Structures are given as C-alpha cells and as structure tokens.
Image: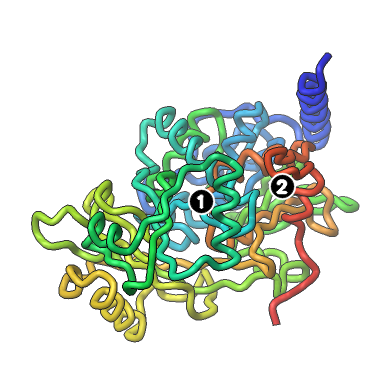
C-alpha cells in the first residue's frame, strides 16, 4: 500500500469515527428538501415547520453550522457532501445585506505578499469557482485578470513574484506606456508606475454565489433554518444545543460558529479584542452611454476599481474606516466617504468623474490580530469551532476554506505540501491568537 492510499484510508477511518461519535451523541436527521434560503427573497419557512426529528420542533443533526456567509455556506455544503446531516442557521438569511460579503461585486486576486498558503488557496479557489459554476448553473467568477500598479519592487512585491515563479503562475510586468496603451480608461497613478498583471484575477458576484451555495446545500439534503442562534445546554466540556430566537433548539455532536463579525457577540469571554470590525464599501458608479470600457472583460481588477458585471456599475472601493457594530450601523456612506469617491474618480478614472453613484454596497470587514483567518476549537468546549477573521480575503477563497474547515471538523488536519506545510503547521497559522487589539 503506498503512502497516499494509506493516508486516504486513515482519513476515511477518522471520518467514520467522527460520524459514529456525533451519531451516538446527536442522532441522525432524516433530511428533507424544505428550508429557508433568504429572508429578502420571501422564501421564508419557520424552523418549526421543517423539523422531522425530536420532540416538538427540535432538530437533531451531526453538525450545526451557525452563520450562512461565505465560510459557513461552503463549510456546510462540504460537510453535507461528506455524508453528514447538517443544519445551517442564519439570523438574517443567506446573501443578506448585513453580511460581510453582500451585494454584487468582489475582487479576486492571487497577490498575497509572502503568504504562500494564501496564494495557493486563491489559485485553487479559481479552479473551484469554475467547477462549481458548471455544477450550480450560476455565473460566479468573471476572470478578467488582476492588475496592481507599482512604483518599485518592495520586499512584499518581490515575495509575490518569487512565489508566482515557484508555482508556475503566469504574470506580466508591464511598462508604464504599455499600461496607458492597453487600459487608457484606468491610467496608472503616475508616469513612474509600472504594472504587475496576472490573468487569474477577476471579479466575483457575492450575492449570487451565497444564494447558489445555499441552494445547492438544500438540494443535497441540508437543512436551512432562519433564526438567531445562541449557545444552549452544555455537558462537561461540550456544547449540546443551540437555542434559536424562536425558542426552538438544535442539537448536534459538533457546532461550527462561522459568524464572522458576530463572533465577539456570541463568545465575548473568548473573542473580546480579537477582531477589529470596520466599515467598508463598494460604490457602484454609472458609466457613459454605450461605453463598455469599464465592464468585464475590458478592464482587469485593479484593486481600487472593479469592472462592471451584469450592468451593476463600476465598483470603486472605499477602504475600511470606522469600527462598527454589524447589527446596528446604517449601511449608508458618509459625506466624507462620498467626497473621497469623487476625488478618486477625478484623479484615477477621469472618464467617470461626472458619472452618478448608482448605489453603495456597505459592509464590514473583520480583521484578526495577525491578518490570518481563525479556524480553531473553542478553548472551553471541545466540539465548538470558531470560524472567522476573514481579514479582507475570505470571500475570494471561500470554496477552499469550506473544504479545509470541513476536514478539520471531521478530524483531519489537511496540510499544504506545495508550501511545505504539514497539517499541524497549517492549523497553527489559523489558531486563535493570544494577542488582542488595543
């Protein structure tokens, strides 16, 4: 037996042991096809009408995933595809406008400095986006390239280039005059700037994606429940249930809290000071009549600006600003932010300087203390996983995150051989760190 086959069989044994364990403690739910997908769509079914096991309206599953953002959605889908019974719970619904990734547009890139695992995960995610598009029948990834403007080769830029070379990722270093010739509608900041272009970059459609993943999860037998979930009964060092805002309970052998910016609210004793939750926004800018230069595929993702998809408008990014409460803050731009948009359009995208702001997709980004995602067990509950800390890049690599977390939950620490990272070394990157924000 070769080592790869042995590892596969060991992984399968770990998963069988996991299923047996959670099955003994939580039971197995006979999964149906009814479920809540999105509060905004009107397709809302009360959890009580969906329950098929337990007393009253209680639900029992192998794994309960709380939070139907990009991390929770993909994790729940992968767990379901592994054959586990899974309940996915969200207080506002999949693709809702209070989430960290709402709206019509997000950027896709492979440039992550010296973080080799991030670059490799982003590369693999690009392939997964395409595979899942074909499966779901929904366009999610618009590959139009990624373009970064640079004035010099910094240590970070050199690290990115070295990783691209190491892993055979194609790229171009484009002189200033060629940038102006190829994309005159988005000129470089100055004559001193050159371009670093890679064809793997592009634009993602977050709302369509979140809805498509949630739909696939339901169609494959997953259960979607609408409600605010709070940790419920404990036994020793394990969580037994979560209680929904309706008063109903969900029992499970394992719980995944993929609630992003809400982690400090759900587990204040553990997450206080661990995340910085800040307001950010994409301003969707109109384009001149008949002008398709600012739409896919005629412009790459430039980081600051994203080309229009489906007529949504050109997306201009306003970087994270104030600390916010994800439940309470109004998703409206401030006068200062609108002024910044106008100034940026005039200086960087002059053909759009007089075009209207069509709408603004305001969201929040939760940064961890070290910029890495958090995938770790709760320090006081051995069956509760904390998943969050997207730090501005989780949505891009959502399909890979879901696969990784699902394997962690079922007992497998997946490594990344291409980056010479063992399972334990990769897991250490995603541990909940002792440090806090001041």
Which residue is depicted at the point 59% across and 37% down? Answer: 51
Which residue is depicted at the point 64% across and 35% down? Answer: 79
- Determine the residue located farthest toward the left in the rendered image: 289
- For this rendering, which residue is in front, 180 or 51? 180
Which residue is depicted at the point 37% across and 53% down? Answer: 40
Quarter of the rendering occupied by the C terminus: bottom right
Quarter of the rendering occupied by the N terminus: top right
User: Please, what secondary structure does the residue beneath circle 1 have?
Assistant: loop
- Is residue 130 in sight in this rendering? yes
> Horizontally, is 127 left or right of 347 in the view?
right
Which residue bears the numbered disc 2? 255
The image shows residue 234, relative to residue 369, as above or below, that is above
- Determine the residue located farthest toward the top in the rendered image: 1
- Determine the residue located farthest toward the bottom in the rendered image: 336
Query: Tag 2 or tag 1, which sits nearer the N-term?
Result: 1
What is the spatial separation of the Cα atoms under label 1 and label 2, in whole angstroms?
31 Å
The image shows residue 348, relative to residue 266, as above or below, that is below
State which quadrant residue 348 falls in.
bottom left
Which labelled disc corresponds to residue 425?
Answer: none
Q: How many marks?
A: 2
Which residue bears the numbered disc 1? 110
Image location of residue 6, percent across then percent down:
82, 21
Image location of residue 296, percent across then percent down:
27, 48
- For this rendering, which residue is in front, 79 or 56? 79
The image shows residue 18, relative to residue 256, as above or below, that is above
Image location of residue 377, percent across then percent down:
78, 53
- For this rendering, which residue is in front, 341 or 80? 341
Specify the color scheme.
rainbow
Image location of residue 102, percent across then percent down:
42, 57
> Horizontally, is 331 left or right of 125 in the view?
left
């Amino acid at each position: 037996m070769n080592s790869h086959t042995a590892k596969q069989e060991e992984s399968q044994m770990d998963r069988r042991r996991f299923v047996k364990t959670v099955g003994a403690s939580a039971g197995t739910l006979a999964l149906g096809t009814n479920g809540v997908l999105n509060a905004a769509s009107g397709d809302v079914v009360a959890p009580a009408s969906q329950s098929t096991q337990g007393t009253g309206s209680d639900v029992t599953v192998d794994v309960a995933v709380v939070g139907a953002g990009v991390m929770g959605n993909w994790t729940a889908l992968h767990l379901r595809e592994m054959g586990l019974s899974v309940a996915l719970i969200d207080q506002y619904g999949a693709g809702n406008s209070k989430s960290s990734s709402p709206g019509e547009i997000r950027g896709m890139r492979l440039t992550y400095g010296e973080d080799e695992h991030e670059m490799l995960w982003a590369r693999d995610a690009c392939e997964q986006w395409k595979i899942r598009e074909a499966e779901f029948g929904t366009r999610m990834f618009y590959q139009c390239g990624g373009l970064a403007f640079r004035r010099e080769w910094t240590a970070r830029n050199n690290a990115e280039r070295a990783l691209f070379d190491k892993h055979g990722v194609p790229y171009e270093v484009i002189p200033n005059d060629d940038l102006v010739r190829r994309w005159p509608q988005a000129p470089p900041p100055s004559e001193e700037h050159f371009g670093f272009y890679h064809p793997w970059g592009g634009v993602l459609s977050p709302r369509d994606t979140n809805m498509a993943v949630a739909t696939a999860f339901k169609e494959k037998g997953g259960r979607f429940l609408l409600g605010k979930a709070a940790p419920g009964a404990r036994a020793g060092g394990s969580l037994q249930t979560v209680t929904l805002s309706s008063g109903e309970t969900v029992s499970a052998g394992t719980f995944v809290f993929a609630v992003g910016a809400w982690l400090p609210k759900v587990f204040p004793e553990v997450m206080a000071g661990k995340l910085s939750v800040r307001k950010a926004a994409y301003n969707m800018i109109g384009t001149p009549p008949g002008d398709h230069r600012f739409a896919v595929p005629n412009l790459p993702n430039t980081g600051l600006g994203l080309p229009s998809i489906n007529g949504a408008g050109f997306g201009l990014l306003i970087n994270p600003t104030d600390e916010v409460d994800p439940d309470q803050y109004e998703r409206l731009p401030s006068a200062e932010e609108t002024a910044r948009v106008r100034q940026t359009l005039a200086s960087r995208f002059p053909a759009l300087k007089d075009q209207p702001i069509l709408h603004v997709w305001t969201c929040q980004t939760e940064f961890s203390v070290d910029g890495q995602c958090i995938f770790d067990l709760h320090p006081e509950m051995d069956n509760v996983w904390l998943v969050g800390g997207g730090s501005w890049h989780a949505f891009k690599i959502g399909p890979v995150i879901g696969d990784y977390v699902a394997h962690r939950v079922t007992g497998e620490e997946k490594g990344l051989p291409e980056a010479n990272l063992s399972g334990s070394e990769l897991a250490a990157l995603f541990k909940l760190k002792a440090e806090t924000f001041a």
